[in-house]
Image (spheres, rainbow, N blue to C red):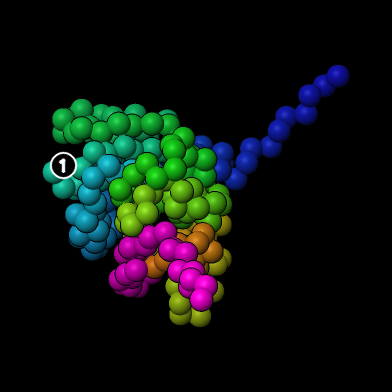
Amino acid sequence: MTNTPTAPSDQEIVTRCYDRIARFYNLIDKPMDLLGVGRRRTRLLSRANGKTLEVGVGTGRNLGLYPAGVQLTGIDVSANMLAKAQQAADCQEADVTLELADVQHLPFDDDSFDTVTATCVFCSVADPVAGLREVARVVKHGGDILLLEHVRPRNPILGWFADRLAPIVSHVIGPDINRRTEDHIAAAGLELLEVRRWGVWREIVARQRLPHAVKPAD
């Protein structure tokens, strides 16, 4: 009996892309920081506190941006990206625990973290709503979820153009440039507390949505 090879999942395809470009990733990503994304990244991550999970730690570019006292755990689906993050952590003598893991299936208990962060990550998650639900599960009640993401342009013409460019970008370097992350956050049961909008970029602070208070019976 011949076993038929199993086709790779959407997430496996993206992970292979990041494994392939890991050694060039910082060079690819640097222009965005020079155009203002770096400033927003720094501002957002300065709000992290306590026991913090960084989803999609990548090559470790954010390691030096966290406030003193943060107890950082970083995960990524790409072993090659994670190896680069370990090199960065060693060079910076950063106190961080790095693990190979997928945000869609986090290996942590409920209510494990005071803060969860992600920068330019949910464009590369096969099921972003599932990933955000996992984030909601592992963050403590009242804890902040800090996201920096790019989204589909609101302008109809730019949106049309991005729709056609997205498959090419996804095939070459992994991310989907057309995600509707604000909608995904709501669909995952999270509450948007703050949103800074700048072109296609979003700085987002979200939390678990608190259940409605039950009015006591008379």
Q: Is 217 covered by the magenta stretch?
A: yes
Residue 40 in sight from this viewpoint: yes
Q: Quadrant of the N terminus?
A: top right
Dot 1 crowding, Cα within 10 Å, few <14, some 14–19, many 20+ = few
**85 vs 178: above or below:** above
Q: Is 136 covered by the magenta stretch?
A: no
- The percent coordinates of residue 91 (x first, y second) are 17, 30
- Residue at the disc numbered 1: 69
Residue 199 figure quarter? bottom left
User: Could you tell me which residue is drawn at 53 percent across and 56 percent down?
Assistant: 129
Q: Would residue 100 appear left or right of 164 to someone viewing this image?
A: left
Q: Would residue 54 appear left or right of 177 to someone viewing this image?
A: left
- The percent coordinates of residue 53 (x first, y second) are 33, 43
User: Could you tell me which residue is drawn at 37 percent across and 41 percent down?
Assistant: 112
Counting labels gives 1
User: Could you tell me which residue is drawn at 46 percent across and 80 percent down?
Assistant: 155
- The percent coordinates of residue 48 (x first, y second) are 24, 51
- The percent coordinates of residue 167 (x first, y second) are 56, 57
The amino acid pointed to by label 1 is Gly
Region in magenta: 193-218
